[in-house]
Image (cartoon, rainbow, N blue to C red):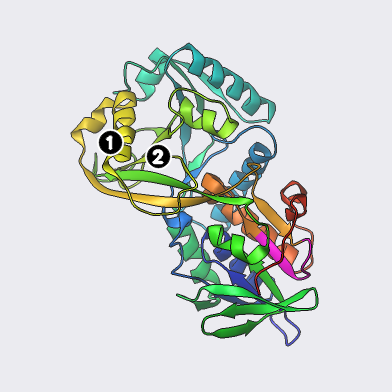
Amino acid sequence: MRSRSSPHVVVVGAGIVGAAAAFFLEAAGARVTLVEAEAPAAGATGASDGAVSVASKRPGPMMALALEARAFYRELSASGVLEGLFHPRSTFLLARGDEEADLLERHGADLAAAGERVVARSAADLRRLLPGLGASVTAGIEVPNDGHAIGYEITARFLGRSRPALRRSTPVRGLKLKGDRVVGVVTAEGEIAADRVIVAAGIGSAALIGLGDVLVPRKGQMAVTDRAQPSGPAIGGHLMAATYLAAKRGISLDKPHIGLVIDPLVTGQFLIGGSREENRSDRRTDAATIAAILREALDFYPPLADRRVIRTFAGIRTACRDGLPIVGPHPAVDGLVVATGFEGDGICLGPLMGACAARLALGEAPATDVSVLSPQRFAVREVAQ
């Protein structure tokens, strides 16, 4: 129940993190204005593969956070908030050759050490579970407890359940400060007063929060096929190449530009990605990159040759230079909370990180320890005003 003393929080960015923050803020009694430069889920949230995956995370804080984030999806699904939107499924990590098999063995051991269930799969096992798998795949591991969620659907559900005051097509140009405290945001249409502000605007966060070149754009191109069957996933899990893991773990293999994933959608289609193009912020696709992705995909799963590509698109992931997101109170501006830099992990981490950002904005400790993600680990320049 809101009262006259309820804080007014402006959330900048209506992707999955910002929408989740708005939902949990309103649930706690706050008044929320959500300010978006384009439209909800118009950025990385709407251009993602939807993996709610522990399997894909590098060891350490990201793997531990992903375990909590995936459990949070299950909790929100069971409570009705995200009912029908989270789909449990396996992730299959696939190797071609000894070098990649060694990488999967190390990664499987790291997952097991973090408490995740991992099943080693021989080539014969994989072909039984995934009929049509390519002859080049020599080994793999299955992570049975992963899941899938479509980012724009999650965003729409959070917004539908909370109904914040939504300002579309309203880029935020700067922050309104009074001394060292934020008191609102500045847009092309004027100022919006606030008691607290959460910046969850992806790459658009960089200019606002004064963290210099810490945030970098990383472009990813993807393709979507027609339906392999009328409904339901065409194969029994998400396929992920060892090259994807290598990029996450900072290991150089022979194809660093392509981190292949083949995502069987609940519609019966396949989403195939993706490139990892450093410091690229355009959303154009090009034939050479899409062709390279599809060649890799056909090698892993030849039945894709029977499908038609009906759409290609590109998304801009916001990466942080040290490989960790930024979530926490701004080190120099009171009342300002930052939640950005999730790169390709935003769909998995989004609801949990939005909940954490909401708690932090209200001056409360989040249920999940996000201190390792604090922006205080970086030198701060002047914020945009």
Sequence order check, earlier mark of 1 and 2: 2
In x, y percent, where is residue 76? 58, 55
**Label 2: element kind:** strand
Closer-to-camera residue (24/83) = 24
248 w.r.t. 340: above or below:
above
Closer-to-camera residue (60/216) = 216
Badge 1 crowding class, 10 Å Cα cut-off, few under 14, some 14 to 19, many 20 or more, is few
Q: Quadrant of residue 103?
A: top right
| Label 1 – label 2 distance at C-alpha | 11 Å
* Residue type, label 1: Ala
- On the rendered image, what quadrant is the C terminus found in? bottom right
Q: Quadrant of residue 117?
A: top right
* Residue type, label 2: Gly
> Which mark, by number, is residue 274?
2
Look at the image and give the residue range highlighted in magenta. 331-338
In x, y percent, where is residue 88? 48, 41
- On the rendered image, what quadrant is the N terminus found in? bottom right
Q: Quadrant of residue 56?
A: top right
> Which mark, by number, is residue 26?
none
* Horizontal relation, residue 236 to residue 225: left or right: right
Closer-to-camera residue (33/236) = 33
* Horizontal relation, residue 67 to residue 372: left or right: left
Residue 43 in view in this figure: yes
Q: Which residue is mark 1?
A: 291
In x, y percent, where is residue 207? 60, 64
Identify the residue at horizontal 52%, vertical 81% (top origin): 188
Identify the residue at horizontal 72%, vertical 61% (top origin): 381
* Horizontal relation, residue 297 to residue 97: left or right: left
Closer-to-camera residue (266/109) = 109
